[in-house]
Amino acid sequence: MSGASKAEKVRSTTVIAVMRDGRIAMASDGQVTVGDAVVKSSAQKVRKATQHAALIGFAGGAADALALGERWEAKLDEHRGNLRRAAVELAKEWRTDRALRRLEALLIVGDPQSVLVVSGNGDVIEPDDGIAAVGSGGSYALAAARALARHTDKPVEEIAAEALRLAAEICIYTNDNVTLESLP
């Protein structure tokens, strides 16, 4: 990454979560950029929580998101797997803590009952339809997933993966190297 200016930031891009019929799937592309250059095409941006039946995905600064993911898991442990409570507590801490406020990322957390988008502004947003997306290609993936969910009987895993592939056809910061996690 030599030659990158200090102003250029490392960015991980698109993540989508689709929930329905007691299942959740979360998919991410693999692209990581510095400025307008692709530096990695196979990054892992979604994962299962280690102790609980929950998923987490991120877009934004990779190191920031990983640090936030660890804090979210600690909150999830502290609140005995209560996804909503853990997300709210993380959002409050993220918004009020001086060091955390500087972290630049968006998180999607979910389990088979709910999907939440968590931001550093204190936002914890639950989508009406159980579909959420973040990152550069998030709006494209979201539109594709909503159309697929409304007009097909595909399982959530297929909807999430296909929505991400469609977003990759439009967004230059999203690739079609899909990583997928699902529950149960």
Image (cartoon, rainbow, N blue to C red):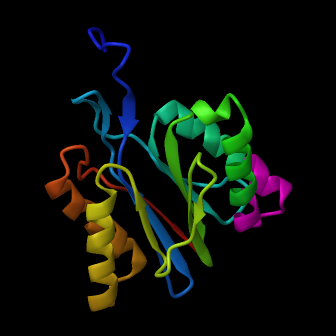
Q: Which residue corresponds to the image point at 27% horizontal and 90% vertical from the top-left?
A: 151
Is 179 left, or right, of 100 in this rendering? left
- Where residue 41 appears, x then y in whole percent? 28, 38
Is 98 left, or right, of 138 in this rendering? right
Residue range of the region highlighted in magenta in the rendering: 73-86
- Where residue 33 appears, x then y in whole percent? 30, 32
Count the marks.
0
Is 84 left, or right, of 130 in this rendering? right
In the image, farthest residue toward the top: 3
Q: 155 or 143: nearer the eye? A: 143
Q: Is residue 85 visible?
A: yes
Is 12 left, or right, of 54 in this rendering? left
Q: Quadrant of the N terminus?
A: top left
Q: 4 or 183: nearer the eye? A: 4
Q: Is residue 152 visible?
A: no
- In the rendered image, the vertical position of residue 73 relative to residue 24, given as above or below: above
- In the rendered image, the vertical position of residue 83 relative to residue 129, given as above or below: above
Quarter occupied by residue 173? top left
Q: 150 or 139: nearer the eye? A: 139
Q: Which residue corresponds to the image point at 35% horizontal and 45% vertical from the top-left?
A: 13
Q: 35 or 77: nearer the eye? A: 35
In the image, farthest residue toward the left: 169
Q: Quadrant of the C terminus?
A: bottom right
- Inspect the magenta stretch and tell me whether residue 76 lies in it: yes
- Where residue 102 appears, x then y in whole percent? 58, 31
**Predominant secondary structure, magenta span:** helix
